[in-house]
Amino acid sequence: MNLISFHGAEILNGESTVIYDLNLEVAKGDLVYLVGKVGTGKTSIIRTIMADNPLMTGEGMVCGYDLRTIRKKDIPFLRRKLGIVFQDFQLLMDRTVEDNLRFVLEATGWKEKDAIRKRIHEVLEDVGMETKGHKMPHQLSGGEQQRIAIARALLNDPELILADEPTGNLDGETAESILNLLSRLNKENGTAILMVTHNRSICESFPGRVLECKDETCVEL
């Protein structure tokens, strides 16, 4: 079964349609890029997948949820199946790395303290940050903060990671280390990744399927 399936979908930004007739399928283990200029609808697709933007026209299924009929109370359950990585990290700056991760686990229904502690250690180890749990976000570099954001995305063992310009605020060397990390998760864990990027060289260094958003369309190249 596909993790993402859109057929004839219209993607909205506010009340305006930014992409017509979107047909997109993402299966377990896929690495898919959304490329295109600023304002062509890439992030709007991500927001639709998260059920942040409504789907009014066409068909859309994400991780077993129908985006046309999903109830508001079910949206948090959909998002637990997704790992989401943003360009600007979106860490809580007033608490430690471990407390950032604990907050997410408790918010998604984890209650057992030992299980929470064990899962936090596992994801920090996954991203090479196992010694940084006691640090505050402002004590970390941009690359380290993005690794923590990826650890956060992995907490509930998602089959799909949505990455919206995950290297946009990083220098070249740091960006490459983040892309190596995401590529390893994709290959070793079979985690599907849908990544928004404006940097086409990424698609050459880490080959995957490429869809281009342009002129109110999104088509595979």
Image (cartoon, rainbow, N blue to C red):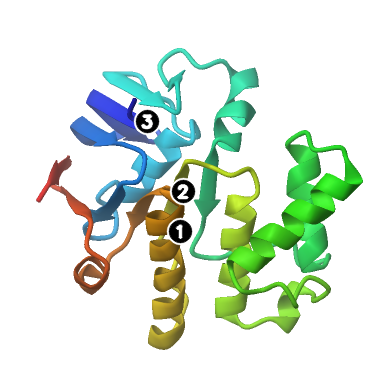
Residue at the far front in the pictured view: 188
**Residue type marked 3:** Glu
Q: Earlier in the sequence, mark 2 or mark 3?
A: 3
- In the rendered image, residue 22, in percent from the top left (x then y), is placed at 21, 32
- In the rendered image, residue 197, in percent from the top left (x then y), is placed at 31, 62
Q: Residue placed at 64% from the left, 55% from the top?
A: 152
Q: Are marks 2 and 1 in contact (CB under 8 Å)?
A: yes
Label 3, secondary structure: give it. loop
**Residue type marked 1:** Leu
Q: Earlier in the sequence, mark 2 or mark 1?
A: 2
Name the image quarter holding residue 186: bottom left
Q: Which mark is residue 29?
A: none
Tell me the CA gap for discs 2 and 3: 27 Å
Residue 90 visible in this rendered orientation of the protein: no
Q: Earlier in the sequence, mark 3 or mark 1?
A: 3
Label 2, secondary structure: give it. strand
- In the rendered image, residue 82, in percent from the top left (x then y), is placed at 52, 40
- The residue mark sitting in front, 2 or 3, is 2
- Side of 25 where 93 appears, left or right: right
Question: Quarter of the image containing the N terminus?
Answer: top left
Closest to the observer, 10 or 142: 142
Q: Residue placed at 38% from the left, 32% from the top?
A: 3
Name the image quarter holding residue 18: top left
Q: Which mark is residue 161?
A: 2
Q: Which mark is residue 185?
A: 1
Closest to the observer, 215 or 75: 75
What is the crowding at mark 1: few (fewer than 14 residues within 10 Å), some, or many (at least 20)?
some
- What residue is disc 3 on? 15
